[in-house]
Image (cartoon, rainbow, N blue to C red):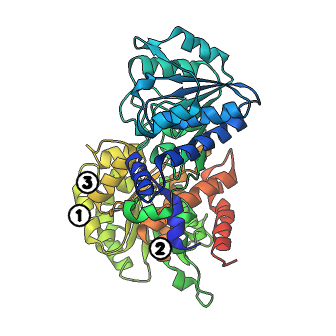
Amino acid sequence: MTAEKSRKNAALLTPEEMAAADRLTIAAGVPGIVLMERAGQAVARAALKLGAPGGAVLVLCGPGNNGGDGFIAARCLAAAGYRVETRLLKAAEALKGDALEAFGRMDMAALPLLKDDRIADDAAEALTRADLIIDALFGAGLDRPLQGGAAELVEAVNRSGKPLLAVDLPSGLNGADGAVPGVAIKARATVTFFRQKPGHLLYPGRALCGEITVADIGIEASVFDQIAPDTFINGPDLWLEAWPRPDPAGHKYSRGHVIVFGGPVTATGAARLSAGAALRAGAGLVTLASPPDAVMVNACHLTAVMLKKLAGVEAIADLLADRRLNAVLIGPGFGVGDKTRAAVTEILKAGRATVLDADALTSFATCPDALFAAIKDNPEPVILTPHDGEFARLFPGLEGGKLCRARNAAAKSGAVVVLKGPDTVIAAPDGRTAINRNAPPWLATAGSGDVLAGIAAGLLAQGVPGFEAASQAVWLHGEAGREAGPGLSAEDLASALKPAIRTLVEKTGQG
């Protein structure tokens, strides 16, 4: 598979981009009702896996194309021997286009769900009779909170305790950013079409979708030539071609040299975690630059990572005069304040690929513009790795969903921004973004972020571009967490990187 095809496989489409893909496909000669038939049949197949044969299925249909998919699914399930009841959010007279055509093909009665903007009594009873409920109400196009009877209906459906299958996206969920501005369906499973949407991966939306199936309904990847999406699922499909392949004739000096700046004697562990992760990620050499008072403590713990005493900020320029030291990490356990700001400024002035984490970010909370100016003056890539609290301090006033905030922060700072969390977003200054989905919850432990920063620095040292290095680091961090398993501590993560790296080696044919 070519790199370009792999990236297309990783693409995420906003609701607007998905609508464009539909329009382009229809314009190319595939009738809209054909796409709707394929979508509805995919929903029916998913329902067969959730409902017992011959069971009672309640299909809740909205007035748009999402409802049309529901009509097709209802017809297919009835033909398969299920007891199907279809309910409409609005009168059938409100249907138009392909949805109206699908309604006619269903050839079944469809009673209203609401009466005077309240759940109809017989509709409430239908919820109790159903063995499976299909949500074909609104889908991904909804960008406002549900209100009135529609909100009451969603709450009643969630209270029913019945298995719920969502068509495209649980109703009430914003497909562009995963937000729930009001109430939303909590599905056991979701069937979407062609490609996932950001709302499937971003919280709180991710928690509402259940198991997601992406159905092929006949839209060709050639639509990307006109849509050109810039948001992706983070994984090897996105960046495998940039994975650093060691030269068989190379040596440790050709794989880059990372400098990790350590903190005072009372806070040495964070930098050591970062340094070990940088080495495990493939950097040929890693040196921990230690304050004099912490040299002995660090020396007692380090083996493959080298150690260098650094007297103070004034010694940084001399250290980085050696151009072989090509990647730098500062922040974990370094301390907050004027000294850190000065150190970061010197590092960026030296023109190195740089990862700024933790204390290096917090130290610029009162003067972020000074940091951003220094980043933009640095010709090498810079990666920032804030959690939500650090992000808010460094980028005050940036509002919106996580994807929007990360993208705007990258443009503002000139850095690749890794906005951490269970749905980490990686954003490049050029607008590209990736959403991560492989991180287990037990990664939320002290020192875990230090390991992530170290992995990123190790990849930068090997010449991986900034966005790809950050994306690879986040994915590897998640895979290491999955490998280490429940009960992990940060010390477990560096060794747990080995199986994940082995997977990439095998994918690239190096193994």
Question: Badges 1 and 2: C-beta atoms under 8 Å apart?
Answer: no
- Identify residue type, mark 3: Pro
What distance separates the C-alpha of mark 3 from that of mark 2? 26 Å
- Identify residue type, mark 2: Val
- Residue 368 circle label: 3
As displayed, is residue 247 above or below residue 478? below
**Left or right side of 445 for 222:** left
* Secondary-structure class at tag 3: helix
Q: How crowded is the residue under tag 1: few (<14 C-alpha within 10 Å), some, or many (20+)?
A: some
- Residue 113 x/y as whole percent: 50, 18
What distance separates the C-alpha of mark 1 from that of mark 3? 9 Å
For the C terminus, the quadrant is bottom right
Name the residue that disc number 2 marks.
Answer: 464
As displayed, is residue 501 above or below residue 445? below
Q: Earlier in the sequence, mark 1 or mark 2?
A: 1
For the N terminus, the quadrant is bottom right
Query: Which residue is found at the position 43% from the left and 77% from the top?
Result: 326
Q: Earlier in the sequence, mark 1 or mark 3?
A: 3
- Residue 240 x/y as whole percent: 55, 70
Residue 372 seen in this snapshot:
yes
As displayed, is residue 130 above or below residue 483? above
- Identify residue type, mark 1: Ala
Name the residue that disc number 1 marks.
Answer: 373
